């Protein structure tokens, strides 16, 4: 199966999109967070559209922290913003 064709839902706008159009954020059992992790990094994941509107919304509503069960202080927001700039 082609991984790129798997659709995921953006936590900000609830739209289903193919994975290449989304930013993936994963937290593992050791509470390490990776933005756009490689396939070896396993854990709870959320997806956000690759646009600043959805990123702002996801961070502002604290939804992302609740889903990932992480303290906002420990969240690498700048890494998510960096993906948008690429
Ligand atoms: Zn979205």
Image (cartoon, rainbow, N blue to C red):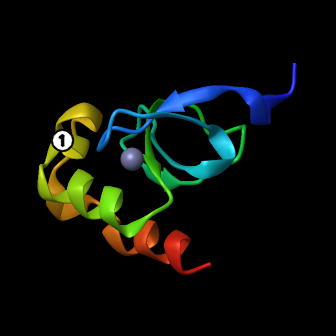
Residue sitting at the far bottom: 85
User: Image quadrant for the N terminus?
Assistant: top right
Q: Nearer the viewer, residue 77 or 27?
A: 77
Residue sitting at the far top: 1
Q: Residue at x 25, y 51 (%)?
A: 58
Quick check: can you spot residue 37? no
Which of the 4 image quadrants contains residue 17?
top right
Count of marks placed on residues: 1
Give the left or right position of residue 23, taking residue 76 as reference. Answer: right
Label 1 environment density (alpha carbons within 10 Å; few <14, some 14–19, many ≥20):
some
Give the left or right position of residue 52, taking residue 70 as reference. Answer: right
Q: In the rendered image, which residue does mark 1 sit on? A: 63
Q: Position of residue 59 (x, y in %)?
A: 22, 57
Q: Position of residue 66 (x, y in %)?
A: 17, 36
Element at badge 1? Answer: helix
Residue sitting at the far left: 61
Q: Residue at x 86, y 27 (%)?
A: 2
Q: Note whether 29 is above or below 81 in the view shown.
A: above
Give the left or right position of residue 43, taking residue 4 as reference. Answer: left
Q: Note whether 69 is above or below 12 in the view shown.
A: above
Residue sitting at the far right: 1
Q: Note whether 56 is above or below 7 in the view shown.
A: below
Quick check: can you spot residue 16? yes
Q: Residue at x 16, y 63 (%)?
A: 73
Q: Position of residue 24 (x, y in %)?
A: 52, 46
Which of the 4 image quadrants contains residue 79?
bottom left
User: Image quadrant for the C terminus?
Assistant: bottom right
Q: Residue at x 25, y 64 (%)?
A: 56
């Amino acid at each position: 199966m082609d991984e790129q064709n798997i659709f995921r839902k953006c936590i900000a706008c609830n739209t289903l999109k193919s994975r290449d159009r989304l930013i993936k954020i994963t937290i593992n059992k050791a509470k390490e967070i990776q933005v756009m992790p490689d396939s070896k990094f396993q854990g709870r994941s959320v997806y956000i559209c690759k646009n600043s509107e959805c990123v702002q919304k996801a961070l502002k509503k604290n939804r992302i922290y609740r889903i990932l069960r992480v303290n906002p202080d420990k969240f690498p927001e700048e890494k998510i913003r960096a993906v948008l700039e690429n």
